[in-house]
Image (cartoon, rainbow, N blue to C red):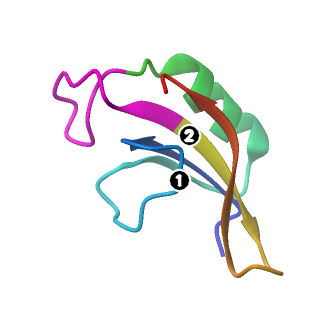
Amino acid sequence: MNTYRVDRAISPVTPCGMNSIRYIGDSFKHAKQMFDFLKPGLDAWNQPNAAYGLILSVWSPERNDYIVKCRKGF
């Protein structure tokens, strides 16, 4: 299981699809670097869209789902 993921999203909820993923892996350091580097305002296909922000999520085995820990652009 990949512990961390960074996504472009239209709401501060981890998307179900794969197009939105900008990082997925087990390194918080790399996830946070990607989150800090990316700018909001682009959709999942890197086209300008002010409705999109960024989220950094962590996997929760108890919930069997990702939980958003950081967000920007919402």
Task: Determine which residue is flagged by label 1.
Answer: 13
> Residue, x 75% and y 79% (percent of image)?
63
The residue closer to the viewer here, 71 or 20, is 71
* Earlier sequence position, callout 1 versus callout 2: 1
Give the residues in magenta: 41-54
The amino acid beneath tag 2 is: Ile
Residue 41 x %, y %: 32, 21
Q: Secondary structure at mark 2?
A: strand
Drawn side of residue 60 relative to residue 5, left or right:
right
User: Can you say whether 60 is above or below 18 in the image?
Assistant: below
Place of residue 11 in the rendered image (x, y in percent of width and height, measured from the top left) = 44, 44
Q: Nearer the viewer, mark 1 or mark 2?
A: 1
Quarter-of-image position of residue 39 = top left
Would residue 56 be found to the left or right of residue 9 on screen? right
Location of the N terminus by quadrant is bottom right
Question: Judging from the image, what secondary structure is the residue with disc 1 in?
Answer: loop
Is residue 47 found inside the magenta-colored segment of the image? yes
Q: Does residue 14 show up magenta in the picture?
A: no
The residue at which mark 2 appears reads as 55
Q: Which mark is residue 65?
A: none
